[in-house]
Amino acid sequence: MNEIVKEVSDYNQRFKLVQNEALGAILIHVCANAYFDESMKLRHLPLELALLTLPLVFNERFCLTFYKMRSSSALFRLMIDNPQLRVGIQKRVESLAKLTFRALDIGNSTGLFNYDSTTQTFQALKLKIPDDIKNSNSEMFYCADKLGRGFLSLGFNQVSTLLGVRY
């Protein structure tokens, strides 16, 4: 029993420790790439949706619940089936804004993505993320990918209404 408690505690600690700008930049890249791929390479991730990525992916309960879902409408289903997940999203968006902007700056300056100020979108560049980084944070990477696809299928207005986020 103590081993199970220790394993859960270690997992929770790992989830908190990895919330940093460099990983955030890579996760936004994954989300932007999925958004672009899902749009049949026609649309890039809008700034407003990029700002939602880290507050959702870095939230342990959201990420692990989302990770387990397999449907194409997972984001919509997740929020309908788990309304308690909406609690605190607005506050997380606000409290993680500084980290998110630093991650966006790192991603833009290192070439993970380009920011187009005319359209206010992020164009993810095709780069291979090292397997050791993906494997050590597999739930977050899967969640970021699925989030990009969910963002596109719902659109910004529906996403912000569904999550209860105001800008």
Image (cartoon, rainbow, N blue to C red):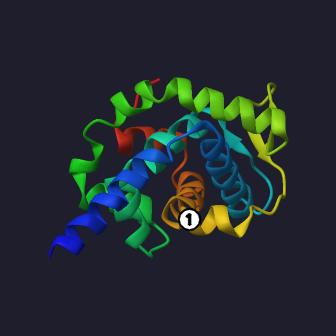
Q: Residue 75: x percent and y percent?
A: 43, 59
Q: Nearer the viewer, residue 112 or 42?
A: 112
Tell me which residue sits at (34%, 63%) in the image. Answer: 65
Left or right: residue 143 versus residue 6 is right
Residue 56 visible to an observer of this rendering: yes
In the image, residue 164 above or below residue 73? above
User: In this picture, is 108 found above or below 12?
Assistant: above
Residue 130, given in percent of the width and then of the height, sits at: 74, 64
- Coordinates of residue 111 in the picture (x, y in percent): 85, 42
Q: Residue at x 41, y 57 (%)?
A: 63
The residue labelled by disc 1 is 136
Left or right: 167 in relation to 23? left
Quadrant of the drawing holding the N terminus: bottom left
| Front position in the image: 59 or 76 | 59
Residue 37, percent across and down? 73, 62
Residue 121 appears in the picture as rendered? no
Under mark 1, the amino acid is Ser
Q: Is residue 36 above or below residue 88?
A: below
